[in-house]
Image: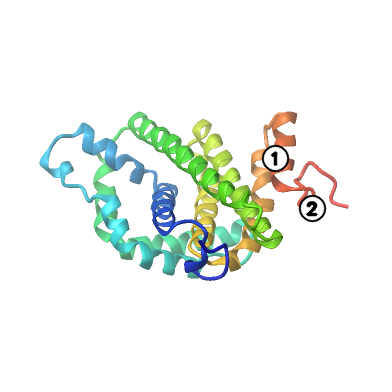
Amino acid sequence: MGSLQSGRGHWALPEVVIDKYSDDLLMGVLDAIDPYFSAIPYVRKKHQTHRFRALPRLRELLDEKRDVLISRITQVLPKEASRMHYLKAQSEVLKIFEEELADVMDEIDELMHILNENELRNSIRTDIRRQMGLLNSMRESILEIASDPEVPDEEFERYMTLDQGIALLIKLYEKMLEDWKNPELSIYILMLSLRILAILNGKLEHIPLLRKDIVEMVPELERDASPEEVEELIKLVGKEWPTSSTPTS
């Protein structure tokens, strides 16, 4: 197999694995844009009416639109890591999904009149746990490839950066389990998911941008963190990327 180089065809990950994880990340992106996306399976199961059994199948739609969505989304990803740039990108990404998944967006409006807050929270928590499991699986696949002794040092560092990004995304999801209405977490989850999605599909120019994202987002996790958790975050970011609680000299 090939290695992590410019161009989608040179990933060491099998094509089918890239497609699977791309779909998983897209689902996470949708949930970060609007939590009601995560409620579609919940509603279909609970409300056994023809109307809601016929809700669009997101997986099928994403399979049809995957390449178009990835192409359009990666073009609007921010070139800088800051809340202002993230908010602008969030607006542009939402516009893309409204154009490409118009039917689903209409159904979201229907769901808002059916689910109460408790039902929505339960569906979100279920979806977050599912996403965390999928991300851990992705980490295992990437680390298995990176452990190959024939992988050059430069490519190994790229794999490690990608792994750091996925690890941070998992931690953001962990925090969202406790604070599912936090808009900052949703923005960070959206941007980090999109950045990883771009890299997964061979857009390696996003590797240095992912490093910037990690530095920008870690302080959000530092808040209210225990000393042990802060130490773990420092290890995640790396010595050359100090967090807000470490010296910057």
Q: How is the image coloured?
A: rainbow
Q: Which residue is mark 2?
A: 240
Tell me which residue sits at (28%, 42%) in the image.
40
Above or below for 80 versus 165: below
The earlier-in-sequence mark between 1 and 2 is 1
Q: Can you give x and y, in whole percent of width and height, for residue 63 in the image?
A: 31, 58
Above or below for 186 versus 42: below
Instruction: Name the mark on residue 241.
Output: none
Q: Is residue 114 visible?
A: no
- Spot the residue most to the left: 50
Q: Amino acid at mark 1?
A: Leu
**Crowd rating for badge 1 (residues with CA inside 10 Å; few <14, some 14–19, many 20+):** many
Task: For marks 1 and 2, give the CA distance.
Answer: 13 Å
- Spot the residue most to the right: 249
Q: Can you give x and y, in whole percent of width and height, for residue 199 in the image?
A: 54, 61
Left-right relation of 54 to 89: left
Tell me which residue sits at (79%, 48%) in the image.
239
Tell me which residue sits at (65%, 52%) in the image.
160
Q: Which residue is mark 1?
A: 233
Q: Secondary structure at mark 2?
A: loop
Q: Secondary structure at mark 1?
A: helix
Q: Can you give x and y, in whole percent of width and height, for residue 124 in the image?
A: 40, 36
Tell me which residue sits at (51%, 66%) in the image.
10
Q: Quadrant of residue 230?
A: top right
Q: Amino acid at mark 2?
A: Glu
